[in-house]
Image: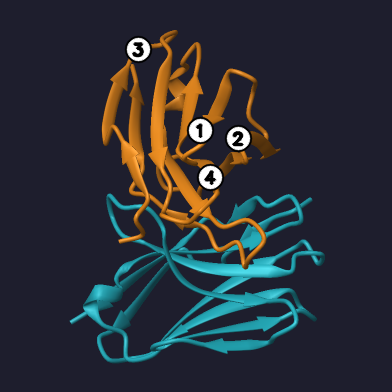
């Protein structure tokens, strides 16, 4: 069945270091992937997305990599800041317009 | 801020009661999706509304129902509340036919006692 999962439930990094959050997906037919950031008490905030015809997309301090061969998605955050501390979700979108979310990775930034 | 608003912010109900949650979509967006997020988990898709009709549904029982109005705002109704319905209910708006990126509101925290 469809599933989106994350390898690491908690990631702790030093301020200024780069962070990498990983995600595996199982539906090879998915053609659109999104990373969301969720801070405590708030709704998920869109970070970056990527379509299946791309393998890399860059934003401001963030990069998403897509490896369709192994069905793997990653989010790279450059120069991680305390404000980056949150739970990060990857999600995949299917033809039925629904988003399937993984369980989330908590990113903790140490000062 | 996404421009998606939800009300109320928090709500406490007892088992067996009914609840209505409301969502106003971002300006220009014609599609609203609802998600349930249990504590410590990722959001789970409930259903989506487009042009005032249900346009996809997740694995939720019929006691979860919804509406979309001509101004694209939406309601989520849950009947016969159960303890397991306690969760954060999220609304997301998007523009059908584009990249369909969904932008979320802050959610309504529902507690069922």
Q: In which quarter of the image is residue B50?
A: top right
Residue extending farthest to the top is B16
Q: Is mark 2 on a helix, strand or loop?
A: loop
**Residue A7 seen by the camera:** no
**Left or right of A53, for residue A82:** left
Q: Which chain is cyan?
A: A
Q: Is residue A17 above or below residue B63?
A: below
* Disc number placed over residue B69 in the picture, else none: 1
* Disc number placed over residue B32 in the picture, else none: 4
- Real-space CA distance between mark 2 and mark 3, rounded to the nearest whole angstrom: 30 Å
Please report contact status of discs 2 and 3: CB closer than 8 Å, yes or no: no
Please report contact status of discs 1 and 2: CB closer than 8 Å, yes or no: yes
- Real-space CA distance between mark 1 and mark 3, rounded to the nearest whole angstrom: 28 Å
Residue extending farthest to the front is B70
Q: Which chain carries label 2?
A: B
Q: Is residue A84 above or below residue B15?
A: below
Q: Mark 2 points at which residue?
A: B52
Between marks 4 and 2 in the image, the one whose residue lies nearer the viewer:
2
x and y percentages locating residue B43 in the rendered image: 51, 47
- Real-space CA distance between mark 1 and mark 2, rounded to the nearest whole angstrom: 6 Å
Please report contact status of discs 1 and 4: CB closer than 8 Å, yes or no: no
Q: Name the residue under label 3.
A: B14
Q: Are marks 4 and 2 on the same chain?
A: yes
Q: In which quarter of the image is residue B107?
A: top left
Mark 3 crowdedness (10 Å alpha carbons): few <14, some 14-19, many ≥20: some
Mark 4 crowdedness (10 Å alpha carbons): few <14, some 14-19, many ≥20: many
């Amino acid at each position: 069945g469809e599933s989106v999962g994350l390898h690491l439930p908690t990631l702790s990094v030093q301020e200024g270091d780069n962070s990498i959050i990983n995600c595996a997906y199982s539906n090879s037919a998915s053609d659109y992937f999104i990373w969301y950031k969720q801070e405590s008490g708030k709704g998920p905030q869109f970070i970056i997305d990527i379509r299946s015809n791309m393998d890399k997309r860059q934003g401001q301090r963030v990069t998403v990599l897509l490896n369709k061969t192994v069905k793997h998605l990653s989010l790279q955050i450059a120069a991680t800041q305390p404000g980056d501390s949150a739970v990060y979700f990857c999600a995949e979108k299917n033809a039925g317009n629904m988003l399937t979310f993984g369980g989330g990775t908590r990113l903790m930034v140490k000062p | 801020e996404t421009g998606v608003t939800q009300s109320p912010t928090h709500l406490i109900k007892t088992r067996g009661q009914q609840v209505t949650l409301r969502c106003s979509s971002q300006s220009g967006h014609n599609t609203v999706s609802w998600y349930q997020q249990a504590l410590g988990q990722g959001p789970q898709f409930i259903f989506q509304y487009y042009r005032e009709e249900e346009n996809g549904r997740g694995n939720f029982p019929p006691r979860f129902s919804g509406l979309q109005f001509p101004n694209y705002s939406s309601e989520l109704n849950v009947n016969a509340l159960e303890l397991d319905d306690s969760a954060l209910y999220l609304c997301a708006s998007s523009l059908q036919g584009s990249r369909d990126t969904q932008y979320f509101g802050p959610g309504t925290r529902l507690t069922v006692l």
